[in-house]
Amino acid sequence: IVTLVGSHLSVFDINGTLLASEYSPGAEPTCAVATDCPEWKEKGVVAITGHVNGEVRFWSLDSDVKTLTVRHLMVDLEHTCQITALRATGVDRQDTLLVGDESGKMSVFKTVQLENLSTKELTEVISELKAEQPKPNAKGDRKGAGELAAGILGLLPGQGRETEEAL
């Protein structure tokens, strides 16, 4: 169960016990929805919030310390005004998110599992991630999309450590 009072997001179990509560920083949230992700699942998304500026945030729960953490921030260029409706849906798992805003626009976002993609599709994803890879900082560190591309490379047949290091 998810409640949103002002900028304060709370997650309760089915018995009404508070699992976590968090103030949502930045843009004010306007709506929230619970997912069917079990609260005990590490890094799982238990709640999704829509915000006045069109952002959508995906929240995970750390039940040990009773906190909510933004797992992913989606800034969609289609939604530049207040999000007014959210719905997580799907047949076997909630892999589709419906997002509506105050202008009447509606978007559909679908997630995919990497293991369900063909080698060709994975290669395309890696190419896109490499193109978005940030330049090294002063320390020579590369952070961001390149790390994800390196992880995905491990899923491709014939791809190994030597390819990951090339990133």
Image (cartoon, rainbow, N blue to C red):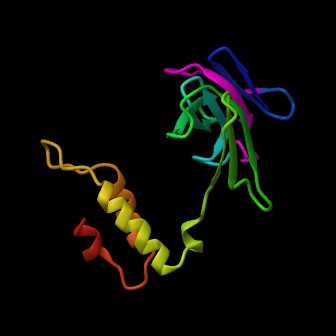
Q: Residue at x 72, y 47 (%)?
A: 37
Establish if 71 lies above or below 19.
below
Place residue 137 in its image quadrant.
top left
Q: How many marks?
A: 0
Q: Residue furthest left?
A: 138
- Magenta-span inclusion, residue 19: yes
Q: Residue at x 64, y 35 (%)?
A: 63
Q: Which of the pair 68/144 is nearer the observer?
A: 144
Quadrant containing the N terminus is top right
Q: Which of the pair 100/9 is nearer the observer?
A: 100
Residue 97, image x, y percentages: 68, 47
Place residue 111 in its image quadrant.
bottom right
Residue 12, image x, y percentages: 77, 29
Q: Residue furthest bottom?
A: 158
Place residue 16 in its image quadrant.
top right
Q: Which of the pair 121/106 is nearer the observer?
A: 106
Left or right: 124 as drawn, with respect to 55 = left
Q: Residue at x 74, y 58 (%)?
A: 93
Q: Residue furthest top?
A: 6
Residue 140, image x, y percentages: 15, 49
Q: Residue at x 70, y 42 (%)?
A: 39
Q: Give, as a single range, the part of the protein colored magenta.
A: 18-39
Quadrant containing the C terminus is bottom left
- Magenta-span inclusion, residue 90: no
Residue 135, image x, y percentages: 20, 50
Q: Which of the pair 111/10 is nearer the observer?
A: 111
